[in-house]
């Protein structure tokens, strides 16, 4: 693909990304008006008076026509405001800025660890299939409690909840990385098996090309496309907040904020968290598409 084609492709990708974020924004604005019950009444509580419910409806802009409410929300969004949290009485943007670094660190460490585990399981010709199957069959709600139980019994120096130094990230990152590595290793194992039997790689081996060169020039570009696609999907989900992991290990990230917003009926915080998660997911997909072109020349 020539330079003009790449520019057009990048522009179309940006339009698709903006369209996705805009659709999510529209959904979180319109959905509360379509619920069978009044969100203001639910947030105010069973014993709230009609005046309190009316005041909450005004705060949530539910007393305005849909068009006027969308314009007001869009104006706030352009000024970097996502409203005020009903639970914390603080700006939603401030709460998201506090939770995002935790989710970002958790996502990046877990993803790097999962990639290392996946390549270790798939790169070895003796890699047992049952190990990959066990990793896939160990989701967070299974691996997390098992790790907590094992640590509480035998490794009490590792924190099991909250943030207390570098050791805090061992258990949640491992609980996240195990199932992610299982899915990645299945893709890698299939693709590496196909490439190892290819005529091109055999010709390189017969010509005495070093192993490191064969990996960088033949095997890595050959598996980059499908592997990075899976990696991007996983990264997008993790950046939006690993809800179960952050809840199990009490990490104050976006996932725990989402759970708290749902339990407290905090509509502005819920809308802001969903919006940020969607934006991060789209950004992760764009980064993966760029990385695929870097590793695989056929996609440039």
Image (cartoon, rainbow, N blue to C red):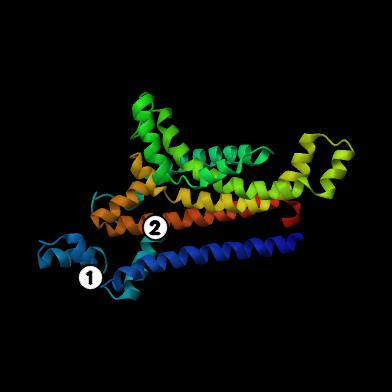
Left or right side of 233 for 106 = left
Q: Residue 83 lies in what quarter of the image?
A: bottom left
Q: Which residue is mark 1?
A: 37
Would you say residue 67 is visible in this rendering? yes
Q: Position of residue 125 (x, y in %)?
A: 69, 39
The answer to whether residue 11 is left or right of residue 42 is right
The residue most toward the right is: 207
Position in image of residue 267 (x %, y %): 29, 60
Quarter of the image where one finds residue 12: bottom right
- Asked whether the viewer can see residue 300, the reply is no
Could you say which is closer to the camera, residue 50 or residue 119?
Answer: 119
Residue under numbered circle 2: 274
Q: Look at 67% across and 50% down and name the residue there.
A: 190
Residue at the spot x=50%, y=38% of the render? Answer: 109
Quadrant location, the C terminus: bottom right
Q: Residue at x 63, y 55 (%)?
A: 289
First in residue order: circle 2 vs circle 1? 1
Q: Secondary structure at mark 2?
A: helix
Position of residue 102 measured from the top left corner of the image (x, y, whole percent): 41, 40
Position of the N terminus by quadrant: bottom right
């Amino acid at each position: 693909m020539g330079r003009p084609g790449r520019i057009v492709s990048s522009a179309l990708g940006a339009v698709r990304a903006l369209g996705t974020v805009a659709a999510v924004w529209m959904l979180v604005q319109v959905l509360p008006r379509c619920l069978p019950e009044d969100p203001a009444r639910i947030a105010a509580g069973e014993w709230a008076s009609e005046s309190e419910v009316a005041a909450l409806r005004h705060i949530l802009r539910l007393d305005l026509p849909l068009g006027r409410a969308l314009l007001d929300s869009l104006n706030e969004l352009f000024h970097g405001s996502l409203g005020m949290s009903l639970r914390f009485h603080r700006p939603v943007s401030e709460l998201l800025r506090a939770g995002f670094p935790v989710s970002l660190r958790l996502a990046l460490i877990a993803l790097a660890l999962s990639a290392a585990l996946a390549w270790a399981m798939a790169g070895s010709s003796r890699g047992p299939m049952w190990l990959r199957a066990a990793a896939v069959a160990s989701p967070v709600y299974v691996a997390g409690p098992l790790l907590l139980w094992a640590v509480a019994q035998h490794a009490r120096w590792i924190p099991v909840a909250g943030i207390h130094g570098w050791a805090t990230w061992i258990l949640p990152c491992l609980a996240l990385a195990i199932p992610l590595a299982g899915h990645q290793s299945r893709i890698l194992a299939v693709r590496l098996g196909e490439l190892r039997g290819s005529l091109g790689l055999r010709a390189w081996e017969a010509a005495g090309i070093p192993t490191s060169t064969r990996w960088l020039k033949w095997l890595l570009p050959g598996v980059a496309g499908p592997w990075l696609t899976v990696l991007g999907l996983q990264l997008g989900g993790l950046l939006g907040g690993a809800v179960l992991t952050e809840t199990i290990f009490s990490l104050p990230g976006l996932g725990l904020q989402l759970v708290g917003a749902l339990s407290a009926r905090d509509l502005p915080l819920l809308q802001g968290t969903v919006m940020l998660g969607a934006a991060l997911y789209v950004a992760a997909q764009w980064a993966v598409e760029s990385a695929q072109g870097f590793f695989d020349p056929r996609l440039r």
